[in-house]
Amino acid sequence: MSAAAPTGPRPDLFQLLTQAERLVQRRLSAILRAEDCSAEAWRVLSLLAAEGGRPMTEVADGTFLPPGTLTKVIDQLVEQTLVYRRVDPLDRRRIRAYLSPRGRQLHDRIAARVAVSIGELPMPVSEREQLGELLGALTEALSRRPVTA
């Protein structure tokens, strides 16, 4: 005897995205705990790994961290020799953050574990790729369209 399909309205996009984000976050949290890395620190490491040295304002925007929180996270990463800061050579009023070699190693190790975890999901690779493309398109569309009340 098979279980009956749930009845009632289908979850909307916001519910599905929230549920998926929470389930993915659980997987990521387990990996980050094992590496003694916070979710905020991981966002900074990932951004710097993908983009190289970035001004602090861009790091704040790209990681969705308020400037005060970002400063604390960067300070911790600098203390752990995972990130370093330098004055921007083009605008000496700005500070840029860079991933150190040690930070690159940590990023690469965590990224590999995340890839394995996602690869273990019982869904075809083509569907994961399609989902990535669709989420990218959704993000781009939402970024272009301001929030209205």
Image (cartoon, rainbow, N blue to C red):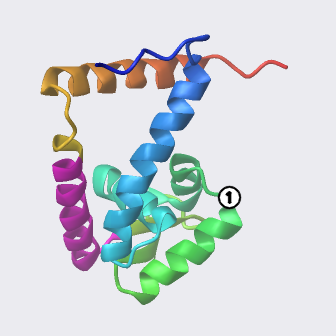
Point out the stretch of residues depicted in magenta.
Answer: 99-117
Q: Which residue is mark 1?
A: 66
- Which quadrant of the figure has residue 30? bottom left
Q: From the viewer's perspective, is residue 21 above or below residue 135?
A: below
* Image location (x, y in percent) of residue 135: 41, 24
Q: Secondary structure at mark 1?
A: loop
Residue at image position (25%, 72%) is 106
- The residue positioned farthest toward the front in the image shown: 1
Image quadrant for the C terminus?
top right
* Image location (x, y in percent) of residue 49: 29, 57
Is residue 96 at least partly visible in the picture? no
Q: From the viewer's perspective, is residue 109 above or below residue 60?
A: below
Label 1 neighbourhood size at 10 Å, few (<14), some (14-19), many (20+)? few
Q: 7 or 127, which lies in front?
A: 7
- Which quadrant of the figure has residue 72? bottom right
Would you say 85 lies left or right of 10 here?
A: left
Q: From the viewer's perspective, is residue 74 above or below residue 131?
A: below
Q: From the viewer's perspective, is residue 30 above or below residue 148?
A: below
Residue at image position (31%, 65%) is 31
- The residue positioned farthest toward the bottom in the image shown: 79
* Image location (x, y in percent) of residue 88: 47, 65
Residue at image position (16%, 21%) is 126
Q: Amino acid at mark 1?
A: Pro
Indicate yes or no whether the magenta region holds residue 104.
Answer: yes
* Image location (x, y in percent) of residue 125: 14, 27
